[in-house]
């Protein structure tokens, strides 16, 4: 309700970082449009990069175009993860004017963590060639980037690209030596296999039946 959203908006400025993060995440989950200006301000001024990441992500979840200017500015944030999440949120909002902005920034973006999320955003916008760029990130020298790429690919799968993505993940798994990255790739593959998708559908059907 409105009272809960008001309390969360206040908590988004709490001195405790984790309280702020929890409140910001909750505002996004609730898609509280009345908090858009507050979250834009948090994204602009918070010195904590984790707080800025969550602010960017929640603005994407709310999907209000008022956030677009601030999210575009966040593409220049000093933290690559913030830049990447801002890109993803622009795709969530659906502001197609951001496509040329992202393409231009990618030419000079040095962080692989930012790049993989920018390519993910472009793919969500319908730039099909970006999928190959994400697949290439499975070969990154940074294992965290490989983990992110696996997670993004699993989330990007549909009937048109599922086989390609599964093949890419299987190849990456054969070569992967880092336990954390192997776990991420295995998790991505498990979510794409038929039995996993059937189980998810069954769970969704159960939830629907409970509602009625």
Image (cartoon, rainbow, N blue to C red):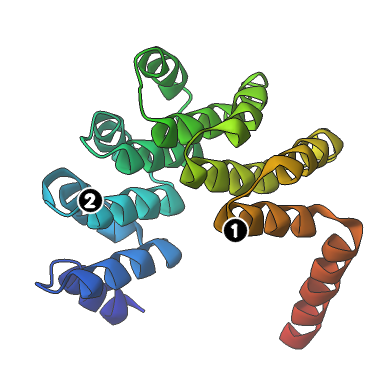
Query: Where the N terminus falls, by quadrant?
Result: bottom left
Residue situated furthest front in the rendering: 177
Kindly identify the residue that appears in the image at 33 percent across and 48 percent down: 56
Q: Is residue 114 above or below residue 19?
A: above
Q: Is residue 37 above or below residue 66?
A: below
For disc 2, the marked residue is 49
Q: Is residue 208 left or right of residue 3?
A: right
Mark 1 sits on what residue? 179
Residue 212: horizontal and vertical position, in percent? Answer: 77, 85
Residue sitting nearer the eye, 205 or 133? 133
Q: CA distance from mark 1 to mark 2?
A: 27 Å
**Spot occupied by residue 65 in the image (x, y as percentages of width and height):** 37, 38
Q: Decide if residue 16 is on the left or right side of residue 52.
A: left
Of circles 1 and 2, the one toward us is: 1
Q: Position of residue 115 (x, y in %)?
A: 45, 29
Kindly state the secondary structure of the residue where label 2 is placed.
Answer: helix
Q: Which quadrant of the structure image shows residue 163?
A: top right
Of the pair 79 and 43, the residue shown nearer to us: 79
Mark 1: few, some, or many residues within 10 Å (few <14, many ≥20)? few
């Amino acid at each position: 309700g409105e009272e809960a959203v008001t309390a969360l908006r206040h908590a988004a400025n709490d001195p405790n970082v984790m309280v702020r993060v929890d409140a910001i995440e909750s505002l996004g989950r609730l898609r509280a449009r009345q908090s858009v200006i507050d979250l834009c301000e948090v994204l602009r001024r918070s010195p904590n990069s984790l707080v800025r990441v969550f602010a960017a992500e929640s603005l994407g979840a709310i999907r209000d175009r008022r956030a677009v200017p601030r999210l575009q500015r966040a593409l220049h944030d000093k933290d690559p993860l913030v830049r990447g999440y801002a890109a993803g949120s622009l795709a969530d909002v659906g502001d197609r004017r951001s496509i040329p902005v992202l393409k231009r920034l990618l030419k000079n973006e040095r962080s692989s963590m930012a790049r993989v999320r920018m390519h993910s955003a472009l793919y969500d916008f319908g730039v099909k060639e970006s999928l190959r760029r994400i697949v290439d990130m499975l070969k990154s020298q940074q294992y965290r980037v490989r983990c992110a790429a696996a997670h993004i690919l699993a989330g990007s799968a549909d009937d048109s690209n599922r086989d390609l993505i599964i093949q890419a993940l299987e190849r990456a798994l054969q070569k992967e030596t880092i336990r954390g990255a192997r776990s991420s790739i295995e998790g991505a593959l498990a979510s794409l296999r038929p039995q996993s998708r059937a189980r998810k559908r069954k769970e969704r059907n159960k939830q629907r039946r409970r509602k009625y």
